[in-house]
Image (tube, rainbow, N blue to C red):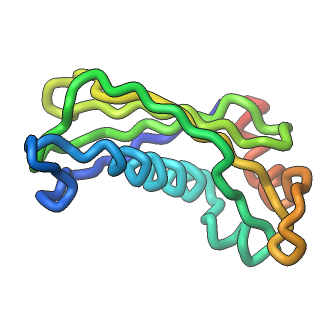
Amino acid sequence: MISHETEIRVRYADTDKMQFVYNGKYLEYFEVGRTELLRSYGLAYSDIEKAGYQLPLIETGLKYKIPATYDDILIVKAIVKELFSAKVHIEYEIYNKETKQLLTNGFTTHMFINAVTKKPTKPPKIYIDQLAPYFNK
């Protein structure tokens, strides 16, 4: 299992008329958590693309518990529990840094595809080689 926590401050533009973070923004926060998770283990998403692969989203789920508001500092925790799968399933937890309350949790599922053919493929060597040492600990 690998995990990483990323800090995000809620911008005014992220909020809706009710002064809560707009529901669609949480998927953007998940994306930041996901890319920073990979980067923290030495694998930038751009490295995967340069190797000829893409990782489109094929499924997502969210559960809203408590709304975030303007200027809150959020902790986005991203977790990958399984490495050797054709699909990359990432779980997320978003907390308010100050209150430590869980605001939102959810998941995204992605599938590796060949960047040229757009056909599904097994996880590329660059992904396995970079992350496997952390799963064997």
> Can you say whether 130 is above or below 2 in the image?
below
Residue at image point 35% right, 29% down: 104
In percent of width and height, residue 7 lies at: 30, 48
Q: Quadrant of the C terminus?
A: top right
**13, 72: nearer the viewer:** 13
| Residue 117, quarter of the rendered image | bottom right
Residue at image point 16% right, 49% down: 16
| Residue 63, quarter of the rendered image | top left
Left or right of 37 in this view: 110: right
Residue at image point 35% right, 34% down: 94
> Can you say whether 104 is above or below 85 in the image?
above
Q: Quadrant of the N terminus?
A: top right
**137, 85: nearer the viewer:** 85
In percent of width and height, residue 82 lies at: 74, 31
**1, 78: nearer the viewer:** 78
Left or right of 86 in this view: 135: left
In percent of width and height, residue 110 lies at: 69, 47
**120, 101: nearer the viewer:** 120
Marker count (numbered): 0
In percent of width and height, residue 81 lies at: 68, 29
